[in-house]
Image (tube, rainbow, N blue to C red):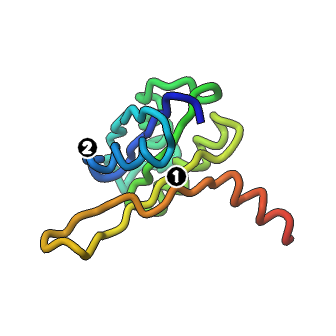
Amino acid sequence: MSNKVILINFGHPVTGEQRGDLEGLLGAEVKVLDAKVQIDMNLPFSEQADDILSKIDVAWQTEQILVSPCGFAPMWGVLLAKMNGKMGYFPTSIRVKSDDSYSVRKFVIGEIMPLQKMRDEARKTR
């Protein structure tokens, strides 16, 4: 990855520690852009996803983009499909997990998931 990666965060706030962990894993500066995902169950998700993505100031096809998914799977599916259309490929995603070694619930980076690579590998088995 290049020296700067943009993390588009559709989920819970990213902590400074999580950002630092990502920078260590990626070997790059991580800039976090928080996307507000407020879902109206009475409106089409496609239109709402277009509105959410229109407020994110990135060059979809030229910047190194990492995403943190929203917690509502139906909307995440729509956002992911729309981003694939804008980018021409699936973005790399992160997964957070609970670290049970602390007395207070703490979430850490669980893995970095290269969705496009996963998709390409799956095509070999069809």
Answer whether labels 1 and 2 touch (C-beta < 8 Å).
no
In the picture, the quarter occupied by the C terminus is: bottom right
In the image, is residue 105 above or below residue 28?
Answer: below
Identify the residue shown where x is 69% and y is 43%. 89
Q: Position of residue 120 (x, y in %)?
A: 78, 56
Helix, strand or loop at label 2? It is helix
| Residue 105 appears left or right of 3 | left
Residue kind at label 2, given as amino acid type? Gly
**Foreground residue among 67 and 15:** 15
Residue at image coords 50%, 43%: 26
Pair 1/2: label in front: 2
Q: Residue at x 59, y 36 (%)?
A: 1
How many numbered marks does the figure carry?
2
The one nearer the camera, 78 or 123, is 123
Among the 4 quarters of the image, the one containing residue 7: top left
Three-letter code, disc 1: Ser
Q: Which mark is residue 93?
A: 1
The label shown at residue 117 is: none
Residue 103 appears left or right of 36: left
Neighbourhood count class around disc 2 (C-alpha, 10 Å): few under 14, some 14–19, many 20 upward:
few
Residue 69 on image: x %, y %? 44, 53
The residue where tag 2 is placed is: 16
Quarter of the figure with residue 56: top left
Question: Callout 1: 10 Å neighbours few (<14), some, many (20+)?
Answer: some
N-term mark: 1 or 2: 2
User: Separation of disc 1 and disc 2 at Cα?
Assistant: 18 Å
Q: Which residue sits furthest left?
A: 103
> Residue, x 33% and y 38% (percent of image)?
34
